[in-house]
Each structure stands twice: as C-alpha cells, then as structure tokens.
Image (spheres, rainbow, N blue to C red):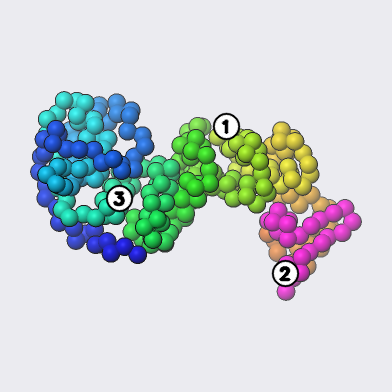
C-alpha cells in the first residue's frame, strides 16, 4: 500500500499562470481531448468556471487535471489561465487528484476509469481501497476494471455509466455482464462481438442477453435464431423450457423461485431433459 498523503492535507495556492509556462502531463488519463468545440463555446459565453490543477516541478508547471480546459483556453488565444498550484505531490497523488476531479466534472468514461484502476492496482491498491480513495462505488470500480482488462476497446469506448444515454451507448454493467458470460460459455470472439453489437443496436435487457449464449450452447441454435428467440420470448420460458407441473416439482424440491431455478439451469447446476431432472449434489434442497 502506498504511503500517499490524505489529499485534503495537500498544500495548494491559487494564481493565474501564463499558459506558455504550463506543460501537459504525458500520463494524462483522458483519452478524448480532441473535440473541444462545446467547451470553447462555454468558456466564451460563461468564462472558465473551474481552475485547472498544476504542480510546480523543476521550474515548470505540469498539469494534474484540466487538460481539456487548458487546450480550449490555449486555442481561444488566452495568455493566462486560473490554476490551483499543488506542492510536493507523489505520482500516485497526481493520478488520484486527476481522477477525482474528472469524476466530479462527470467527464470520465468507463474506459478511462478502468485504465486508472489498473494503474492503481499495479501500485498495490485493492479494488475496495480504490473505491474509498476515489469516492466511487465498488461496483462501478469493479465493472470498469473488468471491462478494461477483458473487452475490446471499441466497445468500451461506446459504453456509458448507468442507463443508456442514446442508442449508440451501452451501459458498462451490460458490457461487463457479456464479458462474464463469454468466459462462462466459452464463446468465440465473433460470437462475443455479435452479442455486443446487438446490445448496442437494440433495447435489450440483461436477461435477454443472458439467454443468447445459453441457447447457442445448449440448443445448438445459430446466432440469428438464438437472438430472435431471446427477443421474442420471456427469458424464464426460454431458459426453463419445461412443463408447468415439472417446474412446480422442481421449485418445491429446491425451495426456490422460478427465477432462481432459471439461473441454476443456466449455471448448469440443474439439467432438465424430456423425461427427468438431474440435480448436482450441492444443489439439492436442504
């Protein structure tokens, strides 16, 4: 564990600094600093609402956070920029400050957060410690990290936190969910990409997504037929696929709900055939 200081104890001054004296940080976490048109318009209309953060190091000022604001001000021809000046920061302090500020600005993407979490893990922080340090929920930290290490970058770039903001974005939780399914069902890369494209193009629920690999691997359907069936039928009916009296028998035996039975079947803890139900010993009713 790093001996990073508590960020609230870090010493800081405020000043307007000449832009030509400020250098960009080569380890900037932001990946999307090119399209600055909206930010530039906002600065022209309202001014710079939040100062950037910099560190004075070896006679130079290095940006800690606010790379997009810095670039926008520079493109607009400003000579000076308001800045919070920090002293004696460690590389870990700089990374955490950069991340927290971007989270507060609500400009950080799942891909960027996953990259940061990966770097902090390399510095011997645990996921829960990172959650506390960044004041971000553990589930968001875990989802972003797992997506970053398991999923193709092009899909993470199209993802978003929380609910789908527009048709072209996918909740990061759904992407990470597909990633876990791909490992459980040993899906091929083309199969994974096809499911992710469906998530991007359709208003599909996680339950419906979950039924696709199940249908592919247990009923030997083509991808097209598996997708069609998952979208047309109720998730539980697709997965359980047994007569009502047999389902009632199974629910009574296991003392579980219809939904719980479906998940046990998908996890292959219970196998259902036309004439019998096979239950692994660890799953028998207590």
Cα–Cα gap, marks 3 and 1: 35 Å
Q: Which residue is drawn at 13% across and 36% down?
A: 21
Asked if 247 appears above or below 284 in the picture, the reply is above
Instruction: Determine the image quadrant of residue 257.
Output: bottom right
Q: Is mark 3 on a helix, strand or loop?
A: helix
- Specify which label sits upstream in the sequence, 2 or 3: 3
Which of labels 3 and 1 is toward the front?
3
Residue 110 in the figure: left or right of residue 187 = left
Q: Which residue is drawn at 27% across and 61% down?
A: 4
Asked if 212 appears above or below 250 in the picture, the reply is above
Residue 157 in the figure: left or right of residue 134 = right
Residue 27: x and y in percent read 31, 43
Q: Which mark is residue 201?
A: 1
Cα–Cα gap, marks 2 and 3: 46 Å
Q: Which residue is drawn at 34% across and 43% down?
A: 29
Instruction: Determine the image quadrant of residue 131.
Output: bottom left
Cα–Cα gap, marks 1 and 2: 39 Å
Q: Can residue 213 be seen in this view?
A: yes
- Specify which label sits upstream in the sequence, 3 or 1: 3
Residue 114: x and y in percent read 43, 48
In the image, which residues are magenta? Answer: 263-286
Disc 3 residue crowd, few under 14, some 14–19, many 20+, Cα 10 Å? some
Q: Name the residue under label 2.
A: 282
Residue 60: x and y in percent read 14, 42
Instruction: Determine the image quadrant of residue 226.
Output: top right
Q: Is mark 1 on a helix, strand or loop?
A: helix
- Specify which label sits upstream in the sequence, 1 or 2: 1
Labels 1 and 2 touching (C-beta < 8 A): no
Q: Is mark 2 on a helix, strand or loop?
A: helix
């Amino acid at each position: 564990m790093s001996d990073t200081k508590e960020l609230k104890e870090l010493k800081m001054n405020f000043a307007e600094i000449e832009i030509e004296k400020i250098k960009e940080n080569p380890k900037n976490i932001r990946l999307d600093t090119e399209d600055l048109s909206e930010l530039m318009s906002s600065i022209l209309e309202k001014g710079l609402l939040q100062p950037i953060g910099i560190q004075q190091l070896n006679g130079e000022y290095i940006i800690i956070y606010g790379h997009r604001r810095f670039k926008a001000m520079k493109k607009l021809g400003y000579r000076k920029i308001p800045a919070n000046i920090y002293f004696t920061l460690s590389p870990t302090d700089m990374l955490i400050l950069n991340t927290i500020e971007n989270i507060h600005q609500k400009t950080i993407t799942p891909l960027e957060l996953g990259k940061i979490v990966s770097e902090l893990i390399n510095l011997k922080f645990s996921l829960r410690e990172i959650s506390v340090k960044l004041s971000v929920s553990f589930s968001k930290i875990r989802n972003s990290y797992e997506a970053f290490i398991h999923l193709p970058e092009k899909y993470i770039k199209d993802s978003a936190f929380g609910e789908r903001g527009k048709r072209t974005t996918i909740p990061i939780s759904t992407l990470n969910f597909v990633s876990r399914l791909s490992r459980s069902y040993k899906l091929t890369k083309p199969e994974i990409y096809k499911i992710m494209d469906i998530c991007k193009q359709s208003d599909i629920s996680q339950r419906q997504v979950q039924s696709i690999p199940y249908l592919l691997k247990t009923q030997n359907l083509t991808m097209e037929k598996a997708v069609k069936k998952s979208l047309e039928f109720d998730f539980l009916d697709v997965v359980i696929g047994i007569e009502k009296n047999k389902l009632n028998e199974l629910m009574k035996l296991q003392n579980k709900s219809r939904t719980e039975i479906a998940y046990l079947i998908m996890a292959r803890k219970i196998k259902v055939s036309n004439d019998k139900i096979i239950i692994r010993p660890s799953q028998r009713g207590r």
